[in-house]
Amino acid sequence: MKNKCKYIFVTGGVLSGVGKGITAASMGAILKAKGFKVTMQKCDPYLNVDAGLLNPVEHGECFVTRDGVETDLDLGHYERFLDFETNKYSITLSGGIYKELIEKERSGGFHGKTVQLVPHFTDLVQEKIAMASKDSDIHIVEIGGTVGDYEGLAFLEAIRLFANKVGRRNCLYISVVYVPWLNTSKELKTKPAQNALKDLRGFGIIPDIVCVRSEKPCSRKICEKIAAFSGIPGEAVLNLPDIDSVYDVPLNVLKSGVLEILNDFVGNDKKPDMRKWEKFSEWCHEQHDKTVKVGLVAKYVGNEDTYICVTEALKAAAAHHKVNLDIVWINAEEATEEDFKNVDGLVVPGGFGLRGVEGKIKAATFALENDKPYLGLCLGLQAACIAAARRAGLKGAGSEEFLNDEDFKKPKDFQNVIYIMEGQKGKESTGGTMRLGDYPAVLKKGTKTAEIYREEAEDCGAYTSGIEVQKTGNVKVIERHRHRYEVNQKYLKDIEKGGLIVAGTSPDKSLVEFVEAPDKTFFIATQAHPEFKSRPLSVHPLFYHFIKILKDQK
Ligand code: GLN
């Protein structure tokens, strides 16, 4: 195996959900700030083939890669922390590995051999790691779950074996463990962490770094104790206590003393340039004079993980504009005009199914009638078009998606303002069949949407990903998608009469990608998910301008 790349493997012990992904991504951010090309990958032991059909309440947002794979929200963290684009190799689920192995077996690809977890599963995982790390200097692999989970064992074996292939000195193993605070005796308890590290050792992995996550800071004594019991040097045990903002984690990881170990591993002691992170973290902590209230009209109220890219994009935009952000969760199923009045602007995020859609349509109607700034994302565009068509007199305007729900009382004059694309029919409950990933759109010269993107492309240059000003003055953009339904262009006249114009389409004009209300302060909706491409250090233009408008209106 070609071996110019170095590998970092991150596993977790004691509990899941203690920030293994953020810790891994923070290490990545530090290494990137040292000048390396860093990529990341998540290996998850689920039997699902991808994350597309997973329940967003249980599992959080489904993140989409540019090449159209539906993944876990951790990939969103990776993109935000490392400002790179993940792809289909950045996620490896057990289900996908089994599927590939079984397909190969069925087609005779194993030539009569017995197919086994070791070596076949473990070899294929290693192949995936090698593919995901192509062209990078450092590749970080996070193993989902906690050490000792049955389903994760083959992944641990794969990453252990990987060191045999590329050389142990080219691999760095990090274990993120949790040290709980016991309130009755008022002390931090190290036993679960010791046991987790013992388990890991049992699988043949002695970590080079142990990150101790805790609610309160751990003393050096506690770290030394963990070190002593797990046979690793004291200075390799780093404490990462809870902090307010995830964007402080890269700086906190750096402060923990990790740099020396990372420098040793990569063979250079260049100081990482963390200035942008420092500035951003400062902004996040500052109390500003102005506060903007954004109403997030959502089905899963208060569940930040379900809309994490949206809330992170809003937070980052607020930090850049130096305003405090107050996200007001508006339950789409019970939303009233009062709720909309109470906020400075409305965001209608993506969603599926009938539940809550009427509230989203109400929000769009209110925004159109009261010039309330509105940012519509995917379903947020569909709701806006239905609202506009109804305003124009098509009272039965709706989406064909509603017809799949038996609770939908189909009106006699139902009009499919949002309809299903020919190629999508009959696939409503199957995985990986939506219009997924990057697709270009052409924004019409002179529209507000085009101006906002164009300004960004010409202005600070912070966010230029895929923006191209064409000779005609139109602006070509590339955004990620995850949807099955489309605007039915048969009703464009009605949508226009209701106050919206088409600001952008697919290059062949067959699909509506952006709509806007030309006479409103800010009413823009897109069929795409721009939140997937927003970064803390380079905010997506639509979010950036949305918050700017709210700030200016104060
Ligand atoms: N349910 C709509 C569709 O499939 C919108 C999807 C979304 O908001 N991601 O087209």
Image (tube, helix red, strand yellow):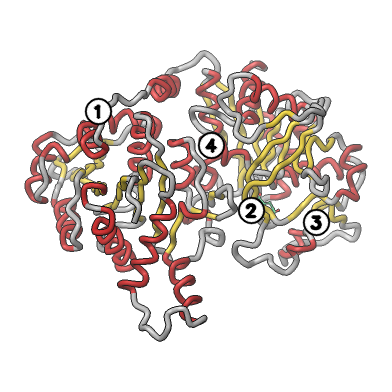
Locate residue 32 relative to residue 226 in the image: left or right. right
Q: Viewer-proximal residue, 133 or 431?
A: 133
Which mark's residue is nearer the viewer, 4 or 3?
3
Q: Residues within 10 Å of mark 3 (few under 14, many from 20)?
A: some
Q: Residues within 10 Å of mark 1 (few under 14, many from 20)?
A: some
Give the Cα separation between the discs numbered 2 and 3.
17 Å
Return the mark for residue 419.
Answer: 3
- Are the residues flagged by discs 2 and 1 in contact, CB closer than 8 Å? no
Give the Cα separation between the discs numbered 2 and 4.
21 Å
Q: Mark 3 belongs to which amino acid?
A: Tyr
Q: Which residue does the numbered mark 1 point to in the structure image?
A: 269
Query: Mark 3 or mark 2, which is nearer the start of the sequence?
Result: 3
Give the Cα separation between the discs numbered 4 and 3.
29 Å
Could you say which quadrant of the image residue 219 lies in? top left
Q: Residues within 10 Å of mark 2 (few under 14, many from 20)?
A: many
Screen quadrant of the C terminus: top right
- Are the residues flagged by discs 4 and 3 in contact, CB closer than 8 Å? no
Q: Which residue does the numbered mark 2 point to in the structure image?
A: 436
Give the Cα separation between the discs numbered 2 and 1.
41 Å
Screen quadrant of the N terminus: bottom left
Query: Mark 1 or mark 2, which is nearer the start of the sequence?
Result: 1
Return the mark for residue 311.
Answer: 4
Q: Mark 1 belongs to which amino acid?
A: Asp
